[in-house]
Image: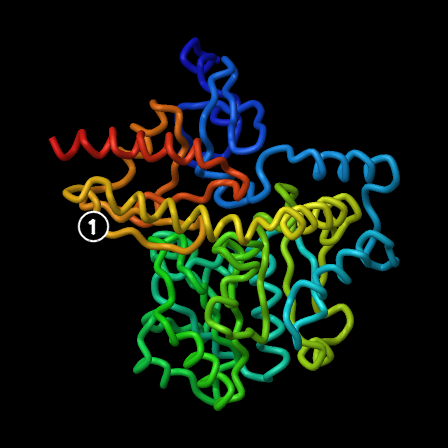
């Protein structure tokens, strides 16, 4: 091993190089702050790509996990389990009818895979329609539904009979026909630039699906669990999907995904047509119960709505020469720049603020919903400082 290699972080030195990591090593976190090895604090608006909804190491999540490790860590889905059962019941209580039964997995992309299988089996059709600029994950079905060719091209041929239409275009809804099993959309497209569904659009999508006997799948892996100012983003538009996909923050940082549908649709599935070894294990279930209770008891969706509205208003006062548009809902915010965004992520990092990109020109913010106003004030100061560099 060379001296140069000795200086590399181990997760670069010994891992398959799938990730473009930033020059920082995080070793601990609390609430909306994470710390590097030297103890330098960073305001975390990256949030584990939207996972840290209740903040880092929330004491109720920590306690739930610790307690459960002493009782039971793993339990086969071939057996009943009390904690898993409690989570199923809790999920059914927070979604609107007719949504109720759910399937538990380990990630958002797995939740999407399950949804695609349900749509095809329940309708007896094969065609799936997704949105241009949409992102649904990197496993083969979710990857096929994803739009960006850079993720897909190396792995073609992918799954046949997937088609993409322009997000927000009512005219292209005619592509949904009696041959379509499911339509899968994000209510707010996160990865491509934080594009919010136009007012009334999702209602028209739902109506078209109803006319053609097609199932509407809403991917709320990033927008769900209070992120946008409602428990689920679809509640902004009064539309209920046939199948709902959840992930990221659902278990307070513990890996989990959930696919929720109606009893009518669920009853069209047969035993052993889908499964997961680790999905809904007692440890993940305990973490999810604690996280959902924190979200509801601490009124985090309402907090996201209030802070997000204030923050976006303040953002609109900054950097008019550098900023093209501010987009988003709640604490899912995109700052569309007139320049490539990546250099500003690195400039913010030097000022101890962690940001994401979305697409080529958009800075994305997915902070914990418990972030303090004073911390967001500091983020505003940093954004003003780094955008002034380009304006000069």
Q: 12 and 329: which one is in front?
A: 329
Q: Is residue 165 left or right of residue 255?
A: left
Classify residue 250 as left or right of residue 342. Answer: right
Residue under the point 67% across and 79% down: 265
Query: Residue 156, percent across and down?
Result: 41, 60
Query: Coloured how?
Result: rainbow
Look at the picture and state if 313 lies above or below 159: above
**Residue 17 found in image quarter:** top left
Q: Position of residue 153 (x, y in %)?
A: 36, 56
**Other-residue count near label 1 (Cα within 10 Å), few / some / many at <14 / 14–19 / ≥20:** some
Q: Quadrant of residue 255?
A: top right
Number of marks in the rendered image: 1
Q: Residue at x 38, y 67 (%)?
A: 197
- Percent position of residue 142, x then y: 50, 61
- The answer to which quarter of the image holds residue 384 is top left
Please indicate whether residue 124 sits to the left or right of residue 287 in the image: left
Is 373 drawn above or below residue 307 in the view shown?
above
- Residue shown at 66%/72% (left/top)? 99
Q: Return the x and y of residue 31 as percentages of the image width and height.
A: 57, 32
| Quadrant holding the C terminus | top left
Residue topped by disc 1? 324
Residue at 50% x, 39% y: name it. Answer: 47
**267 with respect to 315 (left or right):** right
Q: Does residue 27 sit above or below 213 in this rendering?
A: above
Judged from this view, the residue extending furthest toward the top is: 3
């Amino acid at each position: 091993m060379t001296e140069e290699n000795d200086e590399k972080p181990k997760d670069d030195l010994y891992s398959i190089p799938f990730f473009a990591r930033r020059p920082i090593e995080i070793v601990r976190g609390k609430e909306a702050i994470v710390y590097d090895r030297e103890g330098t604090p960073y305001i975390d608006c990256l949030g584990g790509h939207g996972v840290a909804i209740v903040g880092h190491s929330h004491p109720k999540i920590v306690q739930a996990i610790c307690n459960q490790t002493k009782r039971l860590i793993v339990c086969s889905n071939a057996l009943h389990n009390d904690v898993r059962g409690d989570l199923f019941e809790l999920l059914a209580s927070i979604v609107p009818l007719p949504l109720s039964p759910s399937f538990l997995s380990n990630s958002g992309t797995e939740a999407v895979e399950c949804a695609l299988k349900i749509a095809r089996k329940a309708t007896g059709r094969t065609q799936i329609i997704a949105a241009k600029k949409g992102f649904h994950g990197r496993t083969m079905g979710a990857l096929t539904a994803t739009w960006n060719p850079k993720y897909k091209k190396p792995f073609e041929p992918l799954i046949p009979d997937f088609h993409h239409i322009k997000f927000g275009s009512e005219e292209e809804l005619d592509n949904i026909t009696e041959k379509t099993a499911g339509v899968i959309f994000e209510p707010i497209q996160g990865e491509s630039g934080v594009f919010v569904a136009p007012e009334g659009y999702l209602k028209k999508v739902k109506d078209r699906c109803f006319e053609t006997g097609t199932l509407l799948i809403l991917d709320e892996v990033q927008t769900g669990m209070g992120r946008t100012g409602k428990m689920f983003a679809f509640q902004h538009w009064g539309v209920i999907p046939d199948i709902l996909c959840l992930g990221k923050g659902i278990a307070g940082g513990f890996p989990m995904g959930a696919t929720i549908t109606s009893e009518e649709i669920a009853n069209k599935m047969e035993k052993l047509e889908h499964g997961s070894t680790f999905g809904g294990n007692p440890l993940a279930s305990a973490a999810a119960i604690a996280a959902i209770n924190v979200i509801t008891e601490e009124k985090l969706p309402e907090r996201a709505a209030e802070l997000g509205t204030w923050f976006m208003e303040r953002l609109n006062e900054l950097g008019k020469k550098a900023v093209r548009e501010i987009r988003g809902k709640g604490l899912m915010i995109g700052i569309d720049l007139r320049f490539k965004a990546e250099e500003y992520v690195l400039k913010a990092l030097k000022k101890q603020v962690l940001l994401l990109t979305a697409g080529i020109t958009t800075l994305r913010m997915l902070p914990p919903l418990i972030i303090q106003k004073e911390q967001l004030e500091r983020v505003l100061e940093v954004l003003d400082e780094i955008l002034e560099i380009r304006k000069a």
